[in-house]
């Protein structure tokens, strides 16, 4: 996100956070749905989003256009946040759409936070992503953009019904339409990271050949927290193919201490002789 768009998004998000700090979870969820509904409108109407992001129009004119379209159809708090977003500077119409969608996600996560469910949502999204990754057929079915999102949403609901919070289900549905222009799997990953960020945590993706004990997880988490200077949320996957050792990815940092890596390095060294 470019600087102009980011500054505008941050101003709108700060308004949303101030509202969410005083509101009840159900009210915040309703606001989230209004924000996402407007994001959906922007997705469907490229001419509208270009008009609302047009730098040749004054900010108050752009905000007035938005109010003329949605006032009375969305909650007042949602309209306030969206007016701030539209009235500020956006680098492009696509970034305006991404910011509106991101605010809807922010509101869903804020509602989960107020309800004491945010850590649960984070873990559920990760586990769901693991289930999808473990089934090529399921990954293909959910990630196929040629299939209507409503049909894929029905499949997601059948998989998560009774096994996840309503917020997790709603976020998984958003991943189906490509949150932030990403594919389904990448959308889920980003949503996990946003949930962790709201808890002021860094996500570490850990791959091991066999499950870690609770003590081993604590030691690894403590060490990574020392390295990154903040609490770390471990997301552990078991993959027997690595044979042994641990692979850890944090953002763009990769620490690969697996036996498989060492074997591959040895094989490559021998082949080079």
Image (tube, rainbow, N blue to C red):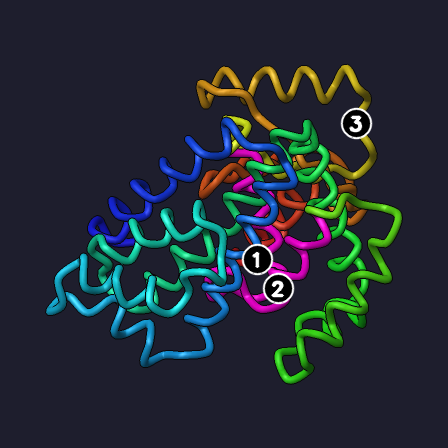
- Secondary structure, mark 1, is helix
Looking at the image, do the residues carrying marks 2 and 1 touch, with CB atoms under 8 Å apart? Answer: yes
Of marks 3 and 2, which one's residue comes earlier in the chain? 2
Residue 31 lies, in percent from the top left, at 53, 48
Q: Give the range drawn in magenta.
A: 168-197
Q: How far apart are marks 2 and 1 (CA)?
A: 5 Å
Q: Name the residue under label 1.
A: 187
Q: How crowded is mark 3: few (under 14 residues within 10 Å), some or many (20 or more)?
A: some
Q: Which residue is drawn at 53% across and 19% down?
A: 225
Of marks 3 and 1, which one's residue comes earlier in the chain? 1
Between label 3 and label 1, give the one nearer the viewer. Answer: 1
Give the side of residue 124 with respect to residue 252, left or right.
Answer: right
Q: Mark 2 points at which residue?
A: 184
- Decide which of 153, 114 is in the foreground and name it: 114
Q: Residues within 10 Å of mark 1 (few under 14, many from 20)?
A: many
Q: Name the residue under label 3.
A: 212
Residue 67 magenta: no
């Amino acid at each position: 996100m470019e600087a102009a768009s980011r500054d505008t998004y941050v101003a709108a998000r700060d308004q949303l956070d101030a509202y969410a700090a005083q509101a009840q979870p159900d009210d915040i969820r309703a606001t989230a749905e209004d924000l996402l509904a407007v994001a959906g409108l922007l997705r469907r109407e490229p001419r509208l989003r270009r008009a609302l992001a047009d730098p040749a129009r004054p900010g108050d004119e752009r905000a007035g256009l938005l109010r003329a379209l949605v006032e009375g159809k969305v909650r007042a708090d949602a309209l306030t946040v969206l007016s701030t977003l539209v009235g500020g500077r956006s680098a492009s119409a696509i970034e305006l759409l991404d910011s509106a969608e991101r605010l809807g996600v922010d509101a869903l996560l804020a509602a989960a936070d107020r309800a004491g469910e945010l850590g649960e949502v984070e873990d559920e999204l990760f586990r769901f992503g693991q289930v999808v990754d473990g089934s090529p057929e399921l990954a293909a079915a959910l990630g196929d953009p040629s299939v209507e999102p409503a049909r894929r949403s029905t499949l997601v609901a059948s998989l998560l019904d009774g096994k996840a919070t309503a917020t997790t289900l709603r976020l998984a549905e958003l991943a189906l339409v490509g949150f932030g222009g990403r594919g389904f799997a990448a959308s889920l990953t980003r949503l996990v990271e946003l949930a962790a960020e709201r808890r002021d945590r860094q996500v570490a993706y850990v791959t091991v050949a066999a499950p870690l004990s609770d003590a081993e997880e604590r030691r690894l988490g403590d060490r990574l927290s020392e390295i990154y200077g903040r609490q770390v949320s471990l997301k552990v996957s078991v993959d027997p193919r690595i044979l042994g050792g641990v692979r850890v990815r944090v953002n763009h940092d990769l620490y690969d201490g697996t036996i498989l890596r060492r074997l591959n390095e040895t094989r490559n060294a021998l082949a080079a002789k």
